[in-house]
Amino acid sequence: MAPSIILIGTRQLTTTHSFLTSPIVEIIVGKGDDETVMTAHQSLLMEAPLLAEFVKNFEASGPRRINLPDEDVDAFGCFLQFQYTRDYTVIQTETSGETAEDKSGDELLRHARIYTLAEKLGLPTLQRIAHGKIHKVKSSPDAELSYARYVYTHTPTTDTTIRKPVATYWANQSHLLRQEVGDDFKKLCIEVPEFSFDVLTIILDRKLKNGSDEIKGSARKRRRDI
């Protein structure tokens, strides 16, 4: 199957910018049937430290080509859209200020993939935009579970910006949502201990703050004949 080709168009500008005259770079994203060829102006790619390293290694007379077989095609396309427009969309119905409906979790995961790609590329502004879009998505419990699993398996422990809201959501809602996704929630807690630890920590900290006798009491004084 021949790779598909995406040409990222130039944004409309009122003034001339240097990227308009910079060389065009070919980026091959994904592999197998998902392999997609994209093109972009080199100077815009230089804004991402990871891609800048690829560009610096180009030979003067060689092809201007970057291979990224492990990256998500949709997420990378949104990155390029952001480079040209300072924003991106993942679905045609997404508009500023609207709350999207996402029962399957696909949209949440798309934004999450863009967030993690932006972290890898070294683009904090794109990370902030992706994180903001995540909070505009209205989703189902199943979608939230898929999103939580992705976040906790694709982000570093130190990234509390995206992890803490996830853990807080489940700390607040798990007593209600477990009736709908109980088995899957339990499976996630077992398979991703960092998630269950963060959720439990929030619950215990809240009880401690509220002065719970059960939390404040000494374990050595607990009755053992119950």
Image (cartoon, helix red, strand yellow):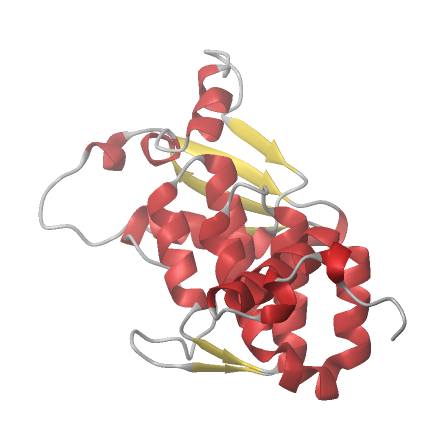
Q: In x, y percent, where is residue 75? A: 53, 53
In this view, the residue farthest toward the top is: 60
Q: Residue at x 26, y 35 (%)?
A: 19
Q: In x, y percent, where is residue 111? A: 50, 61
Quarter holding residue 156: top right
Front-lying residue, 226 or 159: 226
Compared to 81, does 25 lie above or below? above
Q: In x, y percent, where is residue 223? A: 81, 68
Residue 185 visible in the current orientation: yes
Compared to 120, does 14 lie above or below? below
Front-lying residue, 182 or 16: 182
Quarter holding residue 172: bottom right
Q: Residue at x 79, y 70 (%)?
A: 186
Quarter holding residue 122: top left
In this view, the residue farthest toward the right is: 225
Front-lying residue, 90 or 17: 90
Compared to 162, does 30 lie above or below? above
In the picture, measured across the screen, residue 218 lies left or right of residue 182, that is left
Residue 77 visible in the current orientation: no
Q: Residue at x 77, y 80 (%)?
A: 182
In which quadrant of the rendered image does the C terminus lie?
bottom right
Q: In x, y percent, where is residue 96? A: 30, 73
Q: How many marks on residues? A: 0
Compared to 147, does 79 lie above or below? above
In the picture, measured across the screen, residue 106 lies left or right of residue 224, that is left
